[in-house]
């Protein structure tokens, strides 16, 4: 990653409540980069988008998309090829990978069926347009073409941007995808008077039929719209295929990364989690305290007790804005202290001491008195 991109990420992290940032090169034009920013569930995405828009104005060579992490995971599970391509581990530049509930391979299998389902809707409307054209019902045929083109745009928006624009004006869809797919952004060129008028006629087709307005379209305009629809459908299929093939190529690498993560999780579970009694479905977390002997345990207990004393002394003060209920934390610490108390060791130590004294007393009783007196006498003489 270039130094410029690193600086952008640092500034984004300082400014926005970011959970993860991916930097994804465009497949057809690697010089263009997409910053995918994931944030937590409670974040105001619209507010962040406004801040990010101001920030990226000084970096026109980059584009950005902001999504809540929950939405990204939903789309991943549903087989949205945009997120399968974007959330490849090698693109992650900040934060950690989301908690995927299905594997990359499973999501990729769903991607094909998800795309087919969405794309089929547009193809069905195209067939409907042909049907009404044969009936010479041009207004309904134009409505069907409008729906087919709109669905084509919305499908390609999911593929290339991660989210579709919910609107019926093709003009708005063109603006939405302008940077990502310039060919569709200029499908109806506003610079060309004839095409601009054709776009207006197309958008009128939706309102005219839906709201029973007097709508008319000639055969020549209809043929031009059919050509535009063919272009849209071709681009949609190409954009999906491009990302799908790329994801298939990196599948072995991504799967190996997933296996590594799963192995780490399995090792942690094996080391830290234990079944609770006779209930195999319930687990408890096993923690360890590493200390250097009994004295070290007592020093640890002493230190924690001192912390609790200080915390209780200032428990009602304004010092604890970040700890609203310090008494709860003190209680937890005291519970840990109870676990640390070397009660068994002390009992054993008392037993050892008692035995030692008993043995010592017995030795003194068995000791010859004369030897003791002689030794004392010798000592006094010297």
Image: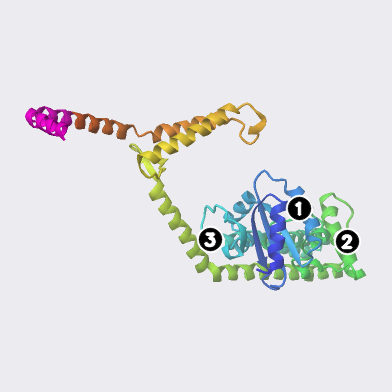
Residue 343 x, y percent position in the rendering = 33, 31
Quadrant in the rendering for residue 159: bottom right
Placement of the N terminus among the 4 image quadrants: bottom right
Dominant secondary structure of the magenta stretch? helix
SS assignment at label 2: helix
Residue 321 or residue 13, whichever sits in front: 321
- Crowding at label 3, few (<14), some or many (≥20) Cα neighbours within 10 Å? many
Residue 374 counted in the magenta span: yes
Left or right of 189, for residue 65: left
- Return the residue found at the far right: 193
Query: Circle 1 is placed at which residue position?
Result: 49
Residue 159 seen anywhere in this rendered image of the structure: yes
Mark sitting earlier along the chain (1/2):
1
Mark sitting earlier along the chain (2/3):
3
Write down the region rendered in magenta: 358-382
Residue 56 x, y percent position in the rendering = 78, 60
Residue 208 counted in the magenta span: no
Left or right of 92, for residue 379: left
Q: Residue at x 61, y 34 (%)?
A: 323
SS assignment at label 3: helix
SS assignment at label 1: helix
């Amino acid at each position: 990653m270039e130094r410029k991109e690193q600086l952008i990420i640092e500034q984004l992290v300082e400014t926005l409540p970011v959970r993860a940032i991916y930097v994804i090169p465009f497949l057809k034009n690697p010089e263009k980069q997409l910053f995918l920013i994931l944030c937590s569930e409670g974040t105001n995405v619209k507010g962040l988008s406004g801040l990010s828009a101001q920030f990226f104005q000084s970096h026109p060579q980059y584009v950005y998309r902001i999504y809540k992490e929950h939405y990204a995971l939903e789309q991943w599970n549903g087989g949205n090829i945009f997120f399968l391509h974007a959330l490849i581990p090698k693109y992650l530049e900040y934060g950690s990978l989301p908690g995927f509930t299905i594997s990359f391979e499973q999501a990729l299998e769903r991607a094909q069926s998800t795309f087919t389902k969405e794309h089929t809707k547009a193809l069905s409307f195209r067939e409907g347009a042909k049907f009404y054209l044969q009936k010479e019902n041009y207004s309904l045929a134009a409505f069907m073409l409008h729906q087919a083109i709109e669905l084509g745009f919305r499908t390609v928006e999911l593929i290339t941007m991660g989210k579709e624009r919910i609107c019926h004006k093709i003009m708005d869809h063109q603006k939405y995808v302008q940077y990502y797919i310039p060919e569709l952004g200029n499908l109806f060129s506003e610079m060309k008077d004839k095409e601009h008028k054709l776009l207006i006629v197309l958008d009128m087709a939706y309102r005219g039929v839906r709201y029973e307005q007097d709508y008319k379209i000639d055969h020549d305009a209809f043929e031009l719209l059919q050509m535009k629809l063919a272009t849209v459908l071709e681009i949609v299929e190409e954009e999906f295929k491009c990302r799908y093939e790329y994801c298939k190529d990196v599948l072995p690498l991504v799967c190996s990364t997933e296996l590594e993560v799963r192995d780490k999780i399995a090792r942690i579970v094996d080391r830290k989690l234990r079944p609770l009694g006779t209930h195999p479905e319930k687990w408890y977390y096993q923690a360890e305290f590493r200390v250097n002997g009994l004295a070290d345990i007592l020093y640890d207990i002493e230190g924690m007790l001192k912390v609790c004393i200080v915390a209780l002394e200032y428990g009602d003060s304004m010092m604890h804005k970040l700890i609203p209920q310090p008494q709860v934390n003190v209680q937890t610490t005291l519970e840990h202290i109870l676990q640390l108390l070397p009660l068994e060791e002390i009992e054993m130590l008392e037993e050892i001491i008692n035995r030692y004294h008993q043995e010592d007393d017995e030795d003194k009783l068995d000791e010859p008195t004369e030897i003791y007196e002689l030794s004392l006498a010798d000592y006094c003489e010297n």
